[in-house]
Image (tube, rainbow, N blue to C red):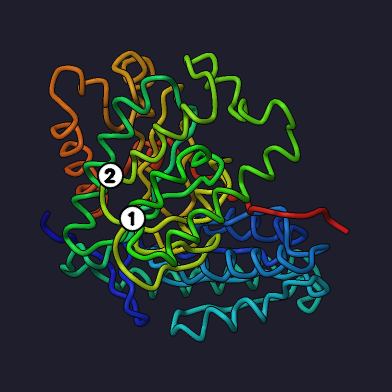
């Protein structure tokens, strides 16, 4: 696999996009962030519903996720917009980001004298950041600088036969060339722990896999009781699936056959290469935020029912499990994995690879063309207070 042309960052990462983001530190600042983007539509907003009324693990998760998104490889610069009295304050977030050498500024709505003044000041800051970003250019880099996030949503009975194994071919190619692949969705690993453990590079990694899947299964049983084996969406069942074990066996094939080198927490950046598992939920919009916050520059998203969602700062490539789905939603789907039946898994996997390389070099994925980029959903573990 050849390398790609990306934006080299001062912290050693490489972006495949060159966004300037406006990120609220708290939900109360979403309105001002929206007004800034109305005035400067080239900027990318990262709206979310959190930043306050949380403590403990959720506070840690949200701070890590937001700060990692603000300094993501695909981000040239960021403006953090705070209210002024929240728990996750704008100056704390921007301080965390600036420590990586990334350009970041912050404002507080209360300190600026209200929403209008804050929006005007913020728009001026963003214009300057965009002018600087426009001066940056791409340079040739190797696949060893790439992190690929894997995701599935709206799976059907064909996903584990066509789309997921084809993506598994891509995963192995990326790992073989020194890159990193992140496989996640812990509830969709239930029933497969013994398979994943055998692929661990060490007993310690195997133990972490076992613990992660066991926690996901316990939580599912605690909440759903006797229906735990049916923790799949109505669309999954309409698509022919019968249980979470069936879905899981298909889900994990996205990771190919490479050894599993480590297990990371939600939104935690991996410190090594190879195939990595992330302890993140099965809900696709939450787990996708986790893999992107971990540094994935691109996401490969398989679907059997036709899930069109993208992500604000990372291109999301959609792989349809059947030719029927691809034909019915061609505006949303990038790859027709139904061709596996005629051309074989390896050839479709190579097609996913070719399309991904084009996207890495700047070609838009369908989700980008359609502006399916408005969703940032942060994972939470406990109630608000």
**Residue lying farthest to the right in this orientation:** 385
Q: Identify the residue at horizontal 34%, vertical 38% (top origin).
A: 253
100 or 236: which is nearer to us?
Answer: 236
**Within 10 Å of the Cα at label 1, are there few (<14), some (14-19), or many (20+) other Cα atoms?**
many
The image shows a total of numbered marks equal to: 2
In the picture, which quadrant includes the C terminus? bottom right
**Within 10 Å of the Cα at label 2, are there few (<14), some (14-19), or many (20+) other Cα atoms?**
many
> Which structural element holds mark 2?
loop
The CA distance from mark 2 to mark 1 is 10 Å
346 or 361: which is nearer to us?
Answer: 346
15 or 80: which is nearer to us?
Answer: 15
> Which structural element holds mark 1?
strand
Task: Give the residue number, with chain letter if any, for mark 2.
Answer: 256
- The picture places residue 92, in percent across and down from the top left corner, at 66, 80
Q: Identify the residue at horizontal 39%, vertical 39% (top origin).
A: 301
Mark 2 vs mark 1: in front: 2
- The picture places residue 76, in percent across and down from the top left corner, at 41, 70
Q: Identify the residue at horizontal 28%, vertical 69% (top origin).
A: 7
- Image quarter of residue 45: bottom right
Label located before the other in sequence (2 or 1): 1
Q: Identify the residue at horizontal 30%, vertical 66% (top origin).
A: 273
Is residue 124 left or right of 310 when viewed as pictured?
right
Confirm or deny contact between disc 2 and disc 1 (CB under 8 A). Answer: yes
In the picture, which quadrant includes the N terminus? bottom left
- Image quarter of residue 118: bottom right
Q: Which mark is residue 181?
A: 1
- The picture places residue 34, in percent across and down from the top left corner, at 64, 54
């Amino acid at each position: 696999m050849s390398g790609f042309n990306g934006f080299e960052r001062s912290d050693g990462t490489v972006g495949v996009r060159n966004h300037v983001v406006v990120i609220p530190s708290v939900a109360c600042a979403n309105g001002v962030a929206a007004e800034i983007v109305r005035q400067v539509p080239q900027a990318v907003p990262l709206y979310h519903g959190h930043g306050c009324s949380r403590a403990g693990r959720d506070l840690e998760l949200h701070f890590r996720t937001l700060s990692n998104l603000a300094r993501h490889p695909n981000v040239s610069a960021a403006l953090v917009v705070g209210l002024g009295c929240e728990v996750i304050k704008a100056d704390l977030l921007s301080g965390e980001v600036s420590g990586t050498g990334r350009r970041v500024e912050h404002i507080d709505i209360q300190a600026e004298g209200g929403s209008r003044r804050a929006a005007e000041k913020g728009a001026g800051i963003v214009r300057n950041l965009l002018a600087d970003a426009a001066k940056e250019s791409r340079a040739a880099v190797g696949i060893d600088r790439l992190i690929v996030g894997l995701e599935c949503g709206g799976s059907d009975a064909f996903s584990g036969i066509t789309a997921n194994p084809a993506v598994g071919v891509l995963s192995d190619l990326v790992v073989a060339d020194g890159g990193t692949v992140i496989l996640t969705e812990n509830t969709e690993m239930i029933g497969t722990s013994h398979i994943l453990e055998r692929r661990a590079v060490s007993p310690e990694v195997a133990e972490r896999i076992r613990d992660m899947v066991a926690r996901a299964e316990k939580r599912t049983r605690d909440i759903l009781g006797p229906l735990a084996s049916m923790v799949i969406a109505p669309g999954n069942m309409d698509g022919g699936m019968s249980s979470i074990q069936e879905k899981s066996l298909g889900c994990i094939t996205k990771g190919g056959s490479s050894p599993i080198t480590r297990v990371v927490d939600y939104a935690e950046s991996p410190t090594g290469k190879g195939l990595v598992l992330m302890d993140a939920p099965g809900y696709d919009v939450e787990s996708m935020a986790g893999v992107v916050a971990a540094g994935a520059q691109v996401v490969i998203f398989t679907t059997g029912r036709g899930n069109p969602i993208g992500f604000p700062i990372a291109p999301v490539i959609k792989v349809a499990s059947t030719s029927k789905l691809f034909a019915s939603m061609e505006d949303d789907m990038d790859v027709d994995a139904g061709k596996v039946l005629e051309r074989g898994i390896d050839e479709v996997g190579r097609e996913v690879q070719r399309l991904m390389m084009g996207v890495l070099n700047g070609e838009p994925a369908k989700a980008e063309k359609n502006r399916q980029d408005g969703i940032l959903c942060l994972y939470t573990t406990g109630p608000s207070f």
